[in-house]
Amino acid sequence: MTTTAATERSTDRTAWLRKMLEIRLFEDKVQELFMEGKIQGTTHLCQGQEAVSVGAVGALEDRDYLTITYRGHGHALARGMTMEAAFGELMGLTSGCCNGVGGSMHLTDFSRNLIGAFAIIGPSYSVALGAAMSAKLRGTDDVAMAFCGDGATNIGTFHEALNMASVWKAPVVFVIENNLYGEYSPLRETTPLDDLADRAKAHAMPGVVVDGQDVDAVRDVASTAIARARAGEGPTLIEAKTYRYRGHSRTDPAKYRAEGELERWKERDPIDLLGAQLASDGSLGEDEQRALRDEVQAEVDAAAERAAAAPTLTLEETKAYVYAR
Amino acid sequence: MSTHVEPAQAEAAAGVTELTYREAIRAALEHELEADETVLLMGEDVATAGGVFKTNEGLSDRFGRERVRNTPICENGFLGVALGMAVTGMRPVVEIMFSDFLPTAADAIVNELPKFRFMSGGQCVVPVTVRSIGGATGRFGTQHSATGESWYMGLPGLKVATAGTPASAYGLLRAAIRDDDPVLFFEHKGLYGRKGPVQLGDGGILPIGKAGVLRPGDDVTVLSTLLMADRALTAAEALADDGISAEVVELRWLRPIDYDTIAASVSKTGRLLVVEEQVHAGGWGATVISELTMRGVSMRPAALSLPDDLLVSYSPALEDAILPSIDAIGDRIRSLVEA
């Protein structure tokens, strides 16, 4: 790296740390609001997986498309959705990105080309492929990125999308967040592979494994795949190996995990890893990092408060959402 | 990109022409592909040899294989692709080769297409037209002969259309493609060779959510779709010689259903016969009878449907026997009127 590039990367890393903290503290706040009854139903939190969201989503241009899943708070925030819009959506209020109609599993923001969040596995891939093909047909070089979890690699739509993307050389980047559990089931109980990137071989596209706790590594792999897609060279399948600290959803205490597994993963916490790096290279000291955390926490609390002040829609108002005409 | 620039060619083609149902479908596709460059046609073999039912003859030559695009065999996958295209500025028309294949894409049809706009809080439109080719008489056997028309009629967010005549095929398909909501559009493969007058051009586009009175009458309302609409019309015309005046209404839209037109007709005739190529339970016929009853329309209702305890066979004689024939429809109309 040249000196200028190194300086730029250092500035980027500070911004990444801030965004990862935002996601972590947002998710923690969601848990708290749940206990207070301000958020209901279910949530699928992503503490521990922040480096994947920030590294991969951050590599996209604004004009590119993104599809995510029900574990999508991190991706949406990484895409620039405001915390107020995200909190509002989880609270079911008009401050939400979908005016509270969608909820936790459907954080969608067309103003940021975040074109869908799916509560059923599979279509995040096929819909992103559609956006990618649309971009291609309209003569742009925009790309699409899609997220799914490890469990989704066993559903037909995943393979259908990979197959079509490869045949059509579509400008799309597929990201698997392998957090080792498909709902409550450990990966190897449902899947005969350790590296899910191997799924790419069957569909004749590059499959890349990356350390999902290392935001730099995720960013680099994503940038390469995006550049490849933009150059018309076709799709890439990225597997980011990561871990979710919480259970699958709100009601899951994750008792099925082996003793010590969570603690071992926390030793490689993505925020701590990046923080240590920034402290050691002198770009952001420990005191500054503490101050940053306090600052983000204050933003999180303020955003939740602002979001909570909004009203709910009436049923009559939601009618306009069912049909365009 | 510009949309709906009416090309000179379509204007020149305007006027009433005698077309087969197949030609009417093709003309609708051609006119929409021509009028709007965001329209595209995709599905299994749609670009090869005019498609399996020859409805797309010459379209891939004229518009190229990017816009008339073959897909792999994966209905749920390519309906997801269509959705992604639709919310990013395209207007895809997807062909499902046999309606029997629709359930393999049930996630897209039930959970994604109708709900997408709603869940986003109205941030997008979903202009996807799903052409689904169904129905018996082709000797295609038990898994290739369903109309499937009522399977997805109970889904807010979706619109469901059926075409029973060449004019309906042309007018409804163009309306579906131009609409900003997802439309499940049913064709009947037993009708492709059937001829009829078609008003080509924008004047032939039919309204969304409106039933069509194919033949006016006073004694009984016969409500039907697809091939049964064609048969009901023939049966009604034959009964005219016997002094029975049957009003034949083509339902056309299963969602939304045009209850006003149906209720007006039945209020006039006092009798309603639904003729459907499906079992009665859980279908549009039962739904219409229920709604009219609740509206207090005074009527004597009857249904001619597929048997509730049988399935469509391959055997030509058995396939013919299970469907309401023109004679059976005529007999049922007569018995209802004379009762």
Image (tube, coloured by chain):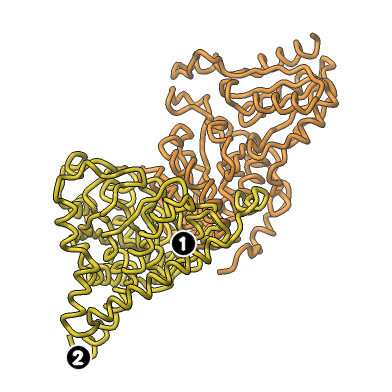
Chain colours: A yellow, B orange
Whole-percent x, y for residue B151 in the image: 53, 31
**Res B280 quadrant in image:** top right
Crowding near the residue tagged with mark 2, few <14, some 14–19, many ≥20 C-alpha atoms within 10 Å: few
Q: Chain of mark 1?
A: A
Nearer the N terminus, badge 2 or badge 1?
Answer: 2
Q: Residue at x 47, y 52 (%)?
A: A39
| Position of B233 relative to A22 (above/below) | above
The amino acid at mark 2 is: Thr
Residue B82 seen anywhere in this rendered image of the structure: no
Whole-percent x, y for residue B279 in the image: 56, 20
| Position of A67 relative to A292 (above/below) | above
In which quadrant of the rendered image does the C terminus of chain B lie? top right
Element class at badge 1: helix
> Residue lying farthest bottom?
A3
Q: Chain of mark 2?
A: A
How far, Cα to Cα, is label 2 from label 1?
38 Å
Task: Write down the residue under mark 1.
Answer: A86
Q: Residue at x 24, y 53 (%)?
A: A179
| Position of B309 relative to B125 (above/below) | above
Instruction: Decide which of A100, B220 is in the foreground and name it.
Output: A100
The amino acid at mark 1 is: Ala
Residue B314 left/right relative to B167: left
Task: Write down the residue under mark 2.
Answer: A3
In which quadrant of the rendered image does the N terminus of chain B lie? bottom right
Crowding near the residue tagged with mark 1, few <14, some 14–19, many ≥20 C-alpha atoms within 10 Å: many
**Res B329 quadrant in image:** top right
Residue A39 seen anywhere in this rendered image of the structure: yes
Element class at badge 2: helix
Q: Residue at x 44, y 70 (%)?
A: A139
Residue B220 left/right relative to B48: right
Marks 2 and 1: same chain? yes
